């Protein structure tokens, strides 16, 4: 990576400008043409430096204010297809398997649910429990948001900021 690549990453991290031609604007900031911005971004993606470019939505502005982490203890004998039903659910943004702590914490499946109210989120969780026959779970609602940014940021001079 050269200094322009580092500055490009910093610009992309700030977010794509909300203008008609955002990559022309980023190029203007970097002093390079739009084609070079796109070429560099594609190369960085091909090299694995950039995994994806996506929109980050402020869900609270959309009225999505209820968020819950659910820890599930699936019944014995569940297969990959059963776990995939959780991951495919539109109300679930994250779905993870983790090792239990025998005798202390037996929950192995974790999902994150979002909705416009606690009642709506609970109804969706109850429906998921009913349709998957997984009735052993704990719901932990978020009460406050402290951080919603990527873990690593690239500074203008190429160093990592945490």
Image (cartoon, rainbow, N blue to C red):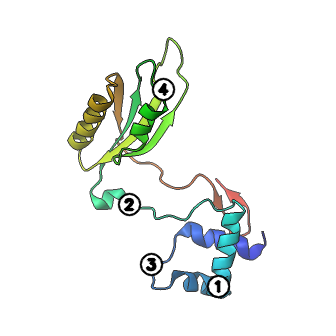
Q: Which residue is mark 3?
A: 18
Quadrant location of residue 135?
Answer: top left
Q: Which residue is mark 2?
A: 58
Under circle 2, the secondary element is loop
User: Tag 3 or tag 1, which sits nearer the N-term?
Assistant: 3
Q: Measured along the vertical axis of the image, is residue 56 above or below residue 84? A: below
* Residue 108 disc label: 4
**Horizontal and vertical percent for residue 101?**
54, 18
Identify which residue is drawn at 65% across, 72% down.
Answer: 41
Under circle 4, the secondary element is loop
* Residue 35 disc label: 1
Q: Measured along the vertical axis of the image, is residue 81 above or below residue 2? A: above
**Horizontal and vertical percent for residue 88?**
40, 44
User: Tag 2 or tag 1, which sits nearer the N-term?
Assistant: 1
Q: CA distance from mark 1 to mark 3?
A: 19 Å
Q: Please indicate whether residue 44 sits to the left or right of residue 16 in the image.
A: right
Identify which residue is drawn at 29% across, 50% down.
Answer: 65
Under circle 1, the secondary element is helix
Q: Looking at this view, name the residue that lies furthest to the right.
A: 2
């Amino acid at each position: 990576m050269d200094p322009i690549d580092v500055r490009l990453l910093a610009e992309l991290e700030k977010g794509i400008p909300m203008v008609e031609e955002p990559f022309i604007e980023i190029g203007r900031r970097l002093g390079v043409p739009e084609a070079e911005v796109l070429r560099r971004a594609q190369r960085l993606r091909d090299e694995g430096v950039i995994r994806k470019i996506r929109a980050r939505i402020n869900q609270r502005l959309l009225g999505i204010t209820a968020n819950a982490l659910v820890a599930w203890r699936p019944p014995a004998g569940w297969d990959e297809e059963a776990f995939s039903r959780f991951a495919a659910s539109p109300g679930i943004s994250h779905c993870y398997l983790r090792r239990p702590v025998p005798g202390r914490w037996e929950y192995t499946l974790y999902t994150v649910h979002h909705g416009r109210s606690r009642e709506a989120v609970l109804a969706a969780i109850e429906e998921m429990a009913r349709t998957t026959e997984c009735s052993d779970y704990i719901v932990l609602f978020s009460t406050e948001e402290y951080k919603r940014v990527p873990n690593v940021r690239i500074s203008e001079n190429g160093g990592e900021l945490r």
